[in-house]
Image (cartoon, rainbow, N blue to C red):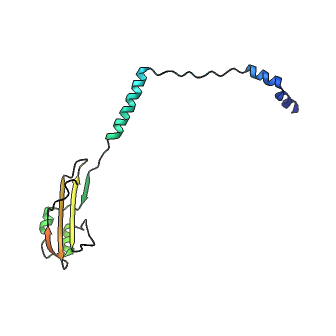
Amino acid sequence: MRAYYDAVASPALAHARARTRKPRAKPKVQALVPMQRILILFLVVLTLAMSSGCVYRANISQGNLIKQEDLDQVEVGMTRNQVRFLLGTPLVDDPFHQRRWDYVYFVRIGRQPATFKRWVTIVFENDVVAEIRADLELDPNL
């Protein structure tokens, strides 16, 4: 074993090994042809254009859909349970205005503003309907 290490460690042997090695060739980098540059630029621009403006917007239906037939059945003097049976649970149940229920509904299709809007307010006095306010104006930017 020792003879092997002595032979490897000798400077003459190391010099002989260095002479037998070939220098590594540098890899050649090909310049891009102008047509390839145009193609790459076109693909980059196309990718940016497609990813920036083509976002899908889902249709939004928000609130309580109230049919006119159901709203026509609500009358002054009905109890809260009767109104809840006809129109459902109100969307806005404000703890600061417990005598008032607001039913709001709107539909927004894609990026367009809301196409159908409805706002109905039922006012109660002593847990019976005192006033019905239908078709109130909602925010036009909704």
**Observer able to see residue 46:** yes
75 left or right of 17 in image: left
Rendered position, 105 above or below 126: above
Instruction: Give me the residue at 13% from left, 69% from top.
Output: 73
Quarter where residue 99 is shown: bottom left
Residue at image point 39% right, 24% down: 38
Front residue of 103/71: it is 103
Against 35, residue 78 (above or below) is below
Q: How many marks?
A: 0
In which quadrant is the N terminus drawn?
A: top right
Horizontal side of residue 89 vs 2, given as left or right: left
How far across and down, in percent of the image, does residue 83 sit?
A: 19, 71
Say which of 79 and 125 sits in front: 125
Residue 84, can we see it? no
Q: Position of residue 135 (x, y in %)?
A: 14, 62
Q: Quadrant of residue 39?
A: top left
Compared to residue 88, the image places residue 50 above or below, namely: above
Residue 108 coordinates in the image, percent (x, y): 23, 52
Q: Is residue 28 left or right of residue 23?
A: left
- Which residue shows up at 42% across the image and 24% down it? 37
Say which quadrant the C terminus sits in.
bottom left
Extreme residue in the bottom direction: 126
Residue at left 20%, top 78%? 127
On the image, the x and y values in percent for residue 117 come to 18, 57
- Name above or below for residue 63 compared with residue 38: below
